Amino acid sequence: MVSIIWGFFIFVGVFFSIVTGNVEALNNQILKGASDGIGILMEMLPVLVLWTGVMKIAEDAGILQKFSNLVRPVLRKLFPSLDKNDPALGYIASNIAANALGLGSAATPFGLKAMDELQKKNPKKDTATEAMITFLILNTGGVTIIPTTVIALRLMHGSANPSEIIITSILATACSSISGLLLDYVIRKRKRS
């Protein structure tokens, strides 16, 4: 569906540029956009590679497993339908750890593995389970302690103090997580009664 929407926007833009006689401006903007995209990628890549490597080292050193064991009691309360030794809980904990460090790209593989494990136990393959919905809420609104990607972008664009957003980031993501989980709990409770 998203590809249809973007395709529509592109079609309207191209059509409008032809009708108004601004085809050269369209060509220039396409080339500039591609160049800007490569520039941002090359500036962001070192930061993402560094933190993805740190996460891999943490995983190999067992730090993510220790974090997983630390948050497992909380996750058991959030995911009552899962067994305490369910492998999905480990992937969910690793996803939370990566998101807490602001590493969305490093969190993605853990999130995909968690959803894959949750889907294996799903009796209705075309419908999300309660555990899947709760995980999606946690993943989307997850608490970010160190927003490394945003800090890297701010640093890249010359911010005088790129890390000044840490407190507001923690507050905003904590509010979104708590709100989402409360709403999930209320809907789940109402659905059962």
Image (spheres, rainbow, N blue to C red):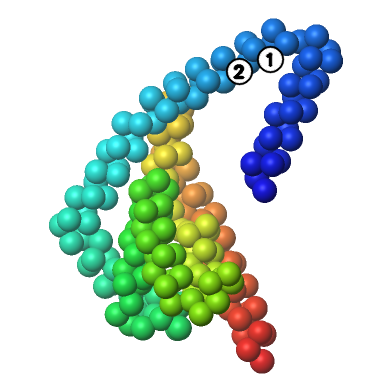
Residue 3: horizontal and vertical position, in percent?
64, 41
Residue 141: horizontal and vertical position, in percent?
53, 58
Label 1: which residue?
A: 26
In the image, is residue 7 above or below residue 102? Answer: above
- At x 48%, y 60%, the residue is 139
Residue 43 lies left or right of residue 4; in this view the side is left
Instruction: Give the camera-side residue of 150 and 35.
Output: 35
- At x 39%, y 42%, the residue is 148
The amino acid pointed to by label 2 is Ile
Contact check, label 1 and label 2, Cβ < 8 Å: yes
Residue 155 seen in the current view: no
Q: 10 Å neighbourhood of mark 2: few (<14), some, or many (≥20)?
A: few
| Quadrant of the image occupied by residue 100 | bottom left
Q: Residue furthest bottom?
A: 193
Label 2: which residue?
A: 30
Instruction: Give the camera-side residue of 174 and 187.
Output: 187
Instruction: Give the camera-side residue of 48 and 155.
Output: 48
In the image, is residue 102 above or below residue 26? Answer: below
Q: Which quarter shows the C terminus?
A: bottom right
In the image, is residue 53 above or below residue 76? Answer: above
